[in-house]
Each structure stands twice: as structure tokens, then as C-alpha cells.
Amino acid sequence: MMRHLLALCFLVLAGAVVSAEDEEMSMPGRQIDELQLSDAEREALDLQLKRARNNPELNPDLYQGDIMLTDEQRKALEERKVMNDSSYWWPKAADGYVNVNYRFAAPSINQTMVRRAISSWETNTCIRFHEITSADGKPHLIFQDNNSGCNSNIGRIYFWNGQPVNLAPGCLTLLGIPVHEIGHAMGFNHEQSRSDRDDYVIVMFGNILTSMASNFDKRGTINFGVPYDYSSVMHYDSYAFTSNGNETLIAKNPYGQLFMGQRDGFSFMDKRIANLQYNCTAVYLRNCGATTDPCQNYGYYGPNCKCECPPGTSGTNCEILIKPYLDALVSTKSNNSRTITTEGVVTSPGYPAPIASVDEYIQIITAPACKKVRLTFTAFGLISRASASDNSCYFQQLIVRRSDILASQPYCGTEILSGQVFESVGNRMVLHFISRLNWVRPGYSATITFVQDQTSPNCTSTTSASTSTTTSTTTTRTTTTSTTTKPTTATPTTTKPTTTTPTTTTTSKPTTTTTKSTERTTTKPTTTTTKPTTTTTKPTTTTTKPTTTITIRTTTTTTKPTTTTIKPTTTKPIKVNNGRK
């Protein structure tokens, strides 16, 4: 979620402009301290950078960074047992609703943001939260700020007492963070912990802090048939627990990289799975006087007595599928994400006009089969690395992924030189661009070419006469009818002795010249044709080696290793011996 942490300072910096003199300054080595900011802007920026460096959702002392475990849960994990997570769900009342009490441990906590998160849960599910002022000897949530970051237990852990939901000040800058922690308290696990996660993401263990690798364990989860959701508010950021500043999670669908770690709030699939987990649909159907859920394509019957439809669908019952769920999300994220399948030029938006807006997009370059992508940069200029964010490309960066499943370092400043070349592994290359700051820089421009892939085992070239023969041709004017040819394949020839034709001499240098023909064979790149009147030759099978020479005179055709004489007055087909007995 690091890429979302500057949301507040973006508003402050939206009008920032670089002077002409500043634009002329050398890009390498520029530090954020040199940017022309007011004291207030610099303070806001520094605060957000520190938060990005010290993500409060990633506490190294807690399971998966923000999960507190009971002794039973910890023991189950140590013994590699699958916990029965349903036993930690909050109970349903007789009317089908789920009632959860809560209280604030101290008035210093940002209650407004917590209440907004609670309202989001109530609006989209059948869970109802009830505020109490003191402990009442019953299960409830305690929202508190003890500076331990953002964390919670998984599900209801007590039958007679309250359980903490810790929300330090840095946890209440984005709505999705308290929504996420309440999700844990309601029994939600992290999305990337799903049992089927390896079908959707690649965990880059080489980029993960060694002591934190266990945070990427899979768990036996109850998924209710809901597909994996890159945009879930419960998903890790792609840089979670990184040891070197590179990505720790790679989406197998490149577009998924745009959404991992979002903390804006519920995704559609989050709402669907919450309603399935607590069987909210039964409550809505009863309240609306309906008996069956008519919704299709992962839609669900909602509290407003109608189908709630996922992005990419339409119709009363979500019955019309317009595009897949992730593709529909991409179209709402940025207008600049696209797939490129032709050679040409690829640039940042509006290049060479400066980048003056916050944006993030994916450009997927796909070459034809047995080709690879060659990307040659002609210009590159982004905001330089910032020492305040551990010398990272935090404000603007371009990630060049030579394959859609290979991680790559981010580039910024002028780190990609003019003329620098990148080649894909396979036939796809992915460009992932991020601009987190309204600050002008020219961007990038590069040329796309598709070149033959000699490394793929499925793309080994097949040697044949048509692909391995280098030919030079000389044509002269003469009054005779002699034609001398070194062909790779015998060609049906008919001759009219009295015709005067240009002499064509063809020399072929084949690398491999074994050709098998079961029917009629024609040799290219040269073909000599003389209008026939009496003779037709139909070879049935012809095998010619590179050393075979065919000499054709006015009345005689000589072929080695076999010789055939053609008489002009003969009308019978000539059978060519192919050397078989």
C-alpha cells in the first residue's frame, strides 16, 4: 500500500510548478530537500515519506504484520494445522443480522474515520455495530491507539471480554486501513494467504526480509467460490516486507499489479464474500419478500432488493457480461493502461509535455509468437531518487519487466540512457509507470521492434530449401536457347526449339537442400517457363542434393545422377527416376 501513502500531501502539492531555471538543472542526484517547497509542504511531504518507510500495517512482531494471534491460533500455525476459521465468526441473531458491540479506549483516537469504516461495513453487509461506553462483560471491539501500528485479531476471540483493534494515528489517513483491520476482526484473512494464491501471484522470496518470510505462508481458507481479487482491501501491497526495495509480490496478470494493497475501501468481491460468509442474502431475500437469488456473474442480492452487480456486467440480474472483472477495473483506474501489439513508439502520456499529474498505469507489449520485444529508449527523465525515502524512486518511477512474471528494479531520474536497450524473455514485456507527485518532468520515449527469438525451444527454425537458399540471378540477351541452372529441385520444363528466349543463369547456395515432394514441385526464387507445344513433364517424386546439376539444351535435358533426353516431337510424359528401386 506504499504507493497510496502520499494521498494527503498530493492535495497540498497539486499546484507546485518547477521554474525554468530548475528544469535546466542536472537531474542526477537531485534530492527532495532541493525542491522548491514551502515549510508546510515540506513538513507534510516528510511525514508521508516517513510513514511510507515505516508502514504501520507491517509490524515485524505480529503475524503477517498486523494480526494478533490467540494461543490456540499460534499453536495451530506452529503445527501446520488448518484452523477452523468459522469458529471465530461472530454469531448471528435470530433475525439473521450480526450484532457487534464496540467502544473507544481513549478520546484521542480519530473517531470520525473509525465511524466511517464502521458505516461502510453496515452499508454493504448485514453486520450491525453498536457503541457502548464501557466494558459490559460481553464480546466487543476496543478501538485504541497504543502506537503499536495497525493490527487486530482474526475473528471473535473472547466470549466475555473485549478485544483490541489497534489504530495508531498513521492508520487513519485512508478509509481502507480501518476497514481492513475491522475485516480481520470479522474473520477475514489476507487475500494473498488464500489456498489458491499461487495461481494468481508469485511470491519473490529473494526480495523478502528473511525473518519475515513466514508472513507469506498460505492458509486453508474458505473462499465461497469467490475468485481471487487483486483489488481486495485485504491484499498486501506489492512491496510488503521488501529487503531491497524491489517487489515481493508479482501478479501473474500484469494488470493486477495496479491494485494490490489498495486502501480506498471495500472492493466489490470483498462485499460479496462478506455477505456470503454471514449469509446476508437470506436476510435481504426475507426482507424483500423474495425466495431465490436471481443474480448472475458473481452478483449478489443486496439490501435494496436488487442485484448488486460487479464491474464489467450489466442487466437487472447482472446477466450481461461485458468484460472480465479485472479488465473492467483497469478501465476505471487509468486511461493510459493498454496492450500494444505492433512495432512503433511508446511514450509516457503527452510526451514530450511534462508529467503534471498523479497517475499509475500498465503498458503490456506483446510480440507475435516466436518473436521477442526489443525496447530502445530515446529519452528518459523523471524525478530523481529521494534520500528521505531511503534513496528510492518513490515519487516517479518506471519498472521495465522483461517478462510479465519477472521482477525488475524501478528507474527514475535519468537512470535509463538514450540508446539503452531492453529485450524481453519470451514475447511479452511490461512497463509499469507510477507518478505519485504533481511535479513536472518530461517522461520517456522508446522504440518498439520485434526480433526473432532464438532461445525458445518452441521457436527452433526448420531448415528447408525455401528458407535457407541464397540466390543471385544474372540475365543476358542472346540469340541461342541455352539455359544452365543449378536448382535445388527439378522443375517441369517444356521447350520449343525455334523460340528465342533470354538466357537466365541462376546460382543457388543452399545450406541444406534436401526436398521431398510427392506431387508437383516448383522451385523458387527462379522459374524458367517457355511456352510449350508438345512436351509435358510431370515428376512424381524428386529428391535433389546440393551437388546436383541440371543442364538443359535446345533438345536435350541432362540430369545427374539421372539423365533424361527430351525429343521435341515426343508427346509422351517423361518419367524422372528419383533414385529409388
Image: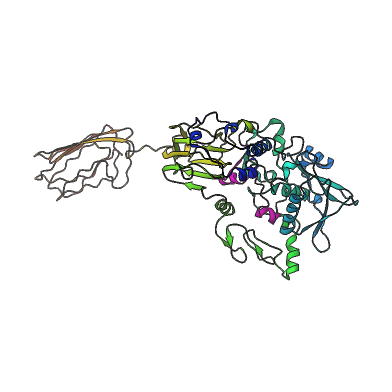
Residue 465: say if magenta: no
Visible residue check, residue 200: no
Residue drawn at (65%, 60%), measured in percent from left and top? 299
Question: Which image quarter is the N terminus in?
Answer: top right
User: Relative to residue 449, is residue 108 drawn left or right?
Assistant: right
Where is the C terminus found, in terms of image quarters?
Answer: top left
Instruction: Return the residue nearer the eye: 176 or 529.
Output: 176
Q: Residue at x 77, y 37 (%)?
A: 62
Q: Position of residue 250 (x, y in %)?
A: 60, 40
Residue at image point 63% right, 32% down: 388
The magenta segment: 247-273
On screen, 195 above or below 60?
A: below
Residue 364 position, x and y percent, is: 50, 44
**What is the x, y in percent for residue 257?**
59, 44
Q: Where residue 11 sits: x, y (%)?
A: 62, 46
Q: Is residue 403 left or right of residue 74?
A: left
Residue depicted at 13% across the width and 43% down the height: 501
Rendered image coloring scheme: rainbow
In front: 357, or 472?
Answer: 357
The image quarter in which residue 314 lies? bottom right
Residue 517 makes an appearance in the image: yes
Residue extending furthest toward the bottom: 289
Asked if residue 190 lies left or right of residue 516, the reply is right
Compared with 506, 573 (above or below) is: below
Number of numbered markers: 0
Residue closest to the far right: 137
Quadrant housing residue 145:
top right
Q: Out of 362 and 465, give the one closest to the viewer.
A: 362
Is 268 covered by the magenta stretch?
yes
Q: Residue furthest top?
A: 29
